Image (cartoon, grey):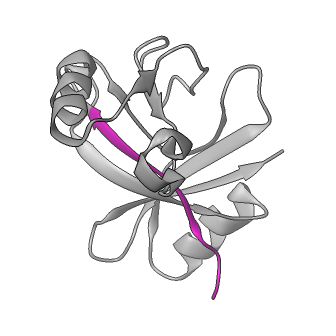
Amino acid sequence: MGQPVVHFEIIGTDPAKLRSYYGDLFGWKFDTSGPVSEAVSEPGNYGFIDPSVSSGGVGIPGGVGGGAGFAAQVTFYVGVPDVEAALQRAESLGGTRRMGPSRAPGTNLVVGHFTDPEGHLIGVAGTA
């Protein structure tokens, strides 16, 4: 297999309401204390989901966040060794860079977004 999906996120204008909805729907618990790039969500308004606390301890890590001014979207992130190189490669194949690379404050996590030739938003994530 190539590079794996390592994270998903659900972004909207009312992240607290979204977290309540998905928490009630799927039993997800959220931790809003972690840092996140301001290009992804308002600080303190992004809730990380830890799949290790799910039944069976399996799943892909994810998060729900956003805030006023953030477009509604669902994104998955592919783990890559170099976010800038992945964004450049996406562009060379007909995609369009939308964001990044952007670092989460106080971490070595770097993320970027691009759209594929049909307009689907995809994320890439790596470390710096």
Quadrant of the snapshot with the C terminus? top right
What are the residue bounds of the magenta stretch? 1-11
Q: Would you say 33 lies left or right of 119 here?
A: right
Q: Residue at x 47, y 11 (%)?
A: 44
Q: Would you say 68 lies left or right of 64 here?
A: left
Which residue in the rendered view is the most extreme toward the front? 56
Of residue 28 and residue 86, the one placed in the foreground of this image is: 28
Q: Residue at x 40, y 15 (%)?
A: 45
Q: Quadrant of residue 73?
A: top left
Quadrant of the snapshot with the N terminus? bottom right
Please state the horizontal and vertical placement of residue 12, each as a whole percent of the image: 23, 31
Please state the horizontal and vertical placement of residue 89, each as a whole percent of the image: 63, 75
Magenta stretch prevailing secondary structure: strand
Q: Is residue 106 magenta?
A: no
Q: Would you say 109 lies left or right of 53 here?
A: right
Please state the horizontal and vertical placement of residue 29, each as a whole percent of the image: 38, 28
Please state the horizontal and vertical placement of residue 71, each as a whole percent of the image: 24, 35
Image position of 52 with respect to 44: above or below: below
Counting the numbered discs, the total is 0
Q: Residue at x 26, y 26 (%)?
A: 19
Image position of 42 with respect to 37: above or below: above
Which residue in the rendered view is the most extreme toward the bottom? 1
Q: Is residue 10 magenta?
A: yes
